[in-house]
Image: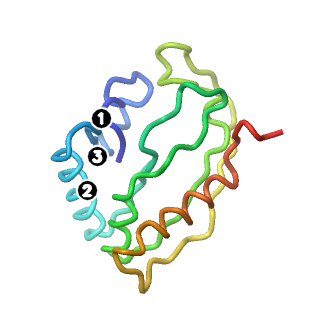
Amino acid sequence: MGKEALLKSPVFKPFFKTIDIPVNRESKMSSFRAFKKAGDNLDKGMSLVIFPEGRIDEEHYPPQLQEFKSGPFRLAIDKNIAIVPISIADAWEKMWDDGSKYGSRPGICDIYIHKPISTDGLVPDDGDRLKERVFNTIKSKVITNEYQ
C-alpha cells in the first residue's frame, strides 16, 4: 500500500502496478477503498506492507521520520494481526527523491526487522498507543540528523 504517485516512478511503477494498493492521499474515498481492499486481502491470508508516514520529508537532509497515519494501526487492531516493524535506515542515500530528479545509485541498505508487536486484547482506542510504539521502534534504527 502506498501513494498513488509511485505509479509515475520509472523505478517503482513495474512493481507498484502489479502488487500494490495505490492510495490518493488527497481523497478520503481513495483511502477508504484502499483500506477496504487491504482488509479483504488480510482476510484471505495475504501479507500487507504499509509505509505509515503521512509524507516523505524531502526538505531535510538526511530526511527525518514523519508522523504516522492512524489507519494502519486501526486496521491491525480490527483484524487482530501483529505488526512487524521494519526500519530501512539508509535507503535515502541511494535514492533521495523518486529517482527522477537526482537519480539513484546501487548499494546496500541497512534494514532492521524488529520483533512483532501483538494486537491481542487491543481495542480501537489503543490505536494511538500502538502507533507511538511502532514509531519509536522504527525510529530507533533510522538515521536522523542526530546520527553520528
Query: CA gap, disc 3 to disc 2?
Result: 9 Å
**Count of residue discs:** 3
Q: Specify whether 74 is left or right of 39.
A: right
Q: Which residue is mark 2?
A: 35
The amino acid marked with disc number 2 is: Phe
Compare marks 1 and 3 and give the one earlier in the sequence: 1
Q: Are marks 3 and 2 in contact (CB under 8 Å)?
A: no
Residue at screen point 20% across, 59% down? 36
Q: Specify whether 6 is left or right of 113.
A: left
Compare marks 3 and 2 and give the one earlier in the sequence: 3
Rendered position, 38 above or below 145: below
| Quarter that holds the C terminus | top right
Rendered position, 6 above or below 47: above
Rendered position, 104 above or below 122: above
- Residue lying farthest to the bottom in this orientation: 121
Mark 3 or 2: in front is: 2
In the rendering, at what x and y percent does residue 53 appear?
A: 46, 46
The amino acid marked with disc number 3 is: Ile
Q: Which residue is mark 3?
A: 21
Q: Which residue is mark 1?
A: 4
Describe the element under mark 1 as helix, strand or loop.
helix
Task: Locate residue 37: give its quadrant.
Answer: bottom left
